[in-house]
Image (cartoon, rainbow, N blue to C red):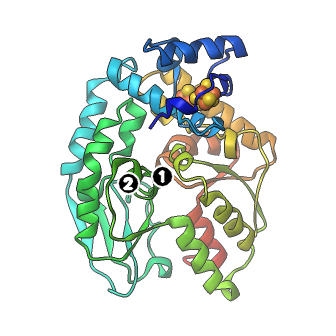
Amino acid sequence: MFIEERCDLCGDCVFLCPYVDYDREQSIEQWRKLMEGETPEIVGQCVTCVACNQFCDKGANPFDLILKRQEETGVLNIPEQNTEVFRNLPDAPSQVIEGDADKPALSLCSVGDFVPGLFDGPLFAGMTVLKGGDYFCNMGWVHLGYETPVREGAQRVVDNLSATGATEIVFYHDDCYALLAAMVKDYGVEIPFRPVHIIEYLLDYVKEHGGEVTPLGMKVAYQQPCASRYTPWKDEQLDELFRLIGVERVEREYDRRYALCCGSPMVPRDREKANAIKKRNIDDAVEHGAQSMAYLCPLCVLNLRKRADAAGLENYHIIELVKKALGHGQ
Ligand code: SF4
Ligand code: SF4
């Protein structure tokens, strides 16, 4: 939620946006117009990466106001076929694969099959797996310029997850974790289980199986998902995980605070701009000495892997890196 009283009109949110090129004065002007109820250019140019919520050191959440205006005006002009996909996802078939009651459950949202084979092997053995429409978090709507379906759908997904009786649920999809560990607080939705991010789960597993790790000695460029902006505390856990499996996260321009979106939100709106974002991202990884891309979000994998491959980079989901270090499935 945008907190107007915290905003001092410094303009950082627009000035630091990596997809536009306003000077300080122009940035302040864009923001002033937005706060006065207008729809300045930045609203339509916004890639929906959520980064400005972190750029604002006053904690005003500027992206939330941009998103509100995007929804009010429909300025992103998202084709109907794209919104239709999201409208239908909650009704897609669901599956519960029962596991051991004393293990946490694992929720895959609607994206569990995007990267095949990730959940095979001992790393997730015995966990109750939840997948499909009942567990779809709706967070993808943010990238279409809509917040209402996320808010209105939150109780449904919490109820479906709660019905499993699990006291801890591990979330594979960063979007789900953003909803359940951060956004539900704004929405006043109570959750009767502890949401555990996949990074935390992997970190605990690697610590418990430290004797089985063979350090990988790899240099990777990390592709931070946009949803991580809502839950930035995981980044230290990721650094520790990389350290324990012998992976160097190269210091590149587009990581951490200045991470770039994978480009997927721009695909339905402007394919040329999407491709330009992907190119900047992969070029940056190569220029900073990465051998591989390391991903958290399966959508980022789908959107960047071809271009990364063409640039001579290997592609790994972080689960694959952990499995490789543990010798699982090698
Ligand atoms: S929302 Fe934050 S970053 Fe943007 S103008 Fe206001 S105080 Fe500055
Ligand atoms: S959400 Fe991202 S693209 Fe949109 S204005 Fe903020 S920083 Fe720029």
- Category of crowding for the residue at label 1, using alpha-carbon neighbours closer than 10 angstroms: few (below 14), some (14–19), many (at least 20): some
In screen coordinates, is 272 left or right of 109?
right
**Three-letter amino acid code at the position of disc 2:** Val
Disc 1 marks which residue?
Answer: 298
In screen coordinates, is 229 left or right of 248?
left
Disc 2 marks which residue?
Answer: 111
* Above or below, 115 relative to 100: above
Residue 26 point in image, percent of width and height: 65, 11
* Above or below, 155 relative to 73: below
Q: Quadrant of residue 277?
A: top right
Whether the residues at callouts 1 and 2 have beta carbons within 8 Å, the answer is yes
Question: Which residue sits at x=40%, y=22%?
Answer: 69
How far apart are the alpha carbons under marks 1 and 2?
7 Å
Q: Secondary structure at mark 1?
A: helix
Residue 241 point in image, percent of width and height: 67, 69
* Above or below, 39 relative to 188: above
Question: Which residue sits at x=37%, y=88%?
Answer: 102
**Three-letter amino acid code at the position of disc 1:** Pro
Q: How many marks?
A: 2
Residue 100 point in image, percent of width and height: 34, 86
Q: Quadrant of ligand 2?
A: top right
> Looking at this view, is 56 or 197 the one in front?
56
- Category of crowding for the residue at label 2, using alpha-carbon neighbours closer than 10 angstroms: few (below 14), some (14–19), many (at least 20): some
